Each structure stands twice: as structure tokens, then as C-alpha cells.
Amino acid sequence: MVAGCASGPRSGNRAPGAGGAGAIYQTGQATYYADKFRGRRTASGERYRASRLTAAHRALPFGSRVRVTNQNNGRSVTVRINDRGPFVGGRIIDLSSKAARRLRMKRAGVVPVTLQIISAD
């Protein structure tokens, strides 16, 4: 279960940088990229690599580092934004396969998360 560049709910949305680094920026649902997106170009021009800790977000600048916390189990991972999306209703971030494994969300496919901005480039 996975979608490439899925979409997210706008609940808890704040302007990038609002609240400063480390503050909760957004809450909503996360998903992860389908295998069919491996090697394809992201919106930043990089190739998607499932083995990297990267993600897609609709508004955060490319290069931003974001801590994603799985609300179901408390596990967190820091990812770098290098793509745009998700574009499926009810989703706020689309994670690489490696990030999804670290959050232990691959079986569920979609999980509730919080996003904290670590740095916005």
C-alpha cells in the first residue's frame, strides 16, 4: 500500500517557519512512495532513492529537514524535503521507503504523524 507523492490533510497547517525550529509545524496523515517511483526525478530534480531519508511536502522549501513522528508508536525520523506532494486527500507528507521502515509504518501504509521543522533551507 503506497502512493507516489500522496496528499495530506491541512489540519494543523502553519506557515513554514512559524513557531521556530523544533515546534510542531503540522499534524496529519503520512504515506510512503510506491516502488514504481524508484529512479524517477523528483520536483527538485533529484532521482528518488528508496534508500535515502527523503520526503515530499507541498509547501516546505527543498532541502528543509523535518522530524516526522509516528503518533501510533512514538518513533521518529528526520527527513530532507526533495519533492512536492502528496496529492491524495487527507495526507501531509510522502516518505521514502527507508523513512517508512524507520517509523514502522509500512504494514499500515498510512499513519498519523506530527511534523517538526529542524531546518528550512
Image: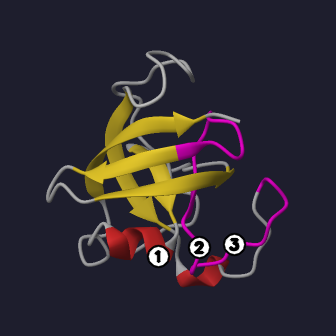
Q: Callout 3: 10 Å neighbours few (<14), some, many (20+)?
A: many
Asked which secondary structure carries label 1, the reply is helix
- Which disc is residue 52 wearing? 2
Residue receiving disc 1: 98
> Does the stretch in magenta take in 55?
yes
For residue 72, say whether it is visible.
Answer: yes
**Front-lying residue, 2 or 26:** 26
Residue 88's place in the image compared with 21, above or below, is below
Q: Is the Cβ of the residue at disc 2 closer than 8 Å to that at disc 1?
A: yes
Mark 3, residue position: 48
Q: Amino acid at mark 2?
A: Arg
Is disc 1 surrounded by few (<14), some (14 to 19) or many (20+) residues within 10 Å? many
Q: Earlier in the sequence, mark 3 or mark 1?
A: 3
Residue 31 picture location, percent across and down: 40, 61
Which residue is painted at 57% across and 23% down in the image?
Answer: 16
What separation in Å lies between label 2 and label 1 (alpha carbons)?
6 Å
Residue drawn where x is 57% and y is 81% of the image:
51
Given this view, does label 3 or label 1 mark the residue nearer the observer?
Answer: 1
Q: Is residue 37 above or below residue 69?
A: below
Q: Which residues fall within the magenta stretch?
A: 43-65
Q: Provide the secondary structure element on which disc 3 rests.
A: loop
**Residue type, mark 1 in image:** Lys
